[in-house]
Image (cartoon, grey):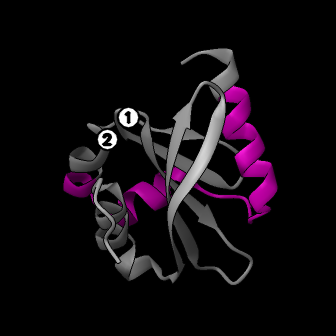
Amino acid sequence: MNLKNIIALKQFDEDHKGGVINSRTLLEQIGRMNWLAISGGRYEVFNSTVFLPVAKGYWVAITLTGADDYTVNRITLRAGKVTVKETFEGVYAENIGEVAYRASCFENAA
């Protein structure tokens, strides 16, 4: 990943001001098979957001909120610019795997 994209992901993380995320716990909540289906086992972690690369510039961004739930965004990352395509708010731990997988689908899931 190039420096422009790393800076863009870091800025996205700072803009969403969530709580400090434990990536290991989140990935266990998502489930190994969902995690592998979404990103092939790849991920990037910043302070409050875990980013799962899907394909063709699409990513799933999972942010821990202050209410101890998650916000899941489908984003595109191209040339150092992040564009939010779809947002799922108020996702609890028991549903994070299903919602993250749904967010990884390229078509609008709404």
For this rendering, which residue is in front, 60 or 67? 60
The image shows residue 2 at horizontal and vertical percentages of 60, 15
Q: Which residues are magenta?
A: 6-34
Q: Quadrant of residue 90?
A: bottom right
The outermost residue toward the top is 2
> Residue at the spot x=30%, y=51% of the render?
35
**Label 2 belongs to which residue?**
39
For this rendering, which residue is in front, 109 or 30? 109
Three-letter code, disc 1: Arg
The image shows residue 57 at horizontal and vertical percentages of 43, 34
Q: Quadrant of residue 89?
A: bottom right
Question: Do labels 2 and 1 touch, CB within 8 Å?
Answer: yes
Q: Residues within 10 Å of mark 1 (few under 14, many from 20)?
A: few
> Residue at the spot x=53%, y=18% of the render?
1
In the figure, is residue 11 to the left or right of 92?
Answer: right
In the figure, is residue 83 to the left or right of 3?
Answer: left
For this rendering, which residue is in front, 14 or 58? 58
The image shows residue 71 at horizontal and vertical percentages of 57, 71
Q: Is residue 48 above or below residue 56?
A: below
Spatial distance from mark 2 to mark 1, Cα to Cα? 5 Å
> Residue at the spot x=31%, y=41% of the render?
39
**Label 1 belongs to which residue?**
42
Q: Residues within 10 Å of mark 2 (few under 14, many from 20)?
A: some
Secondary structure mainly formed by the magenta segment: helix
Three-letter code, disc 2: Ser
| Kind of element beneath mark 2 | helix
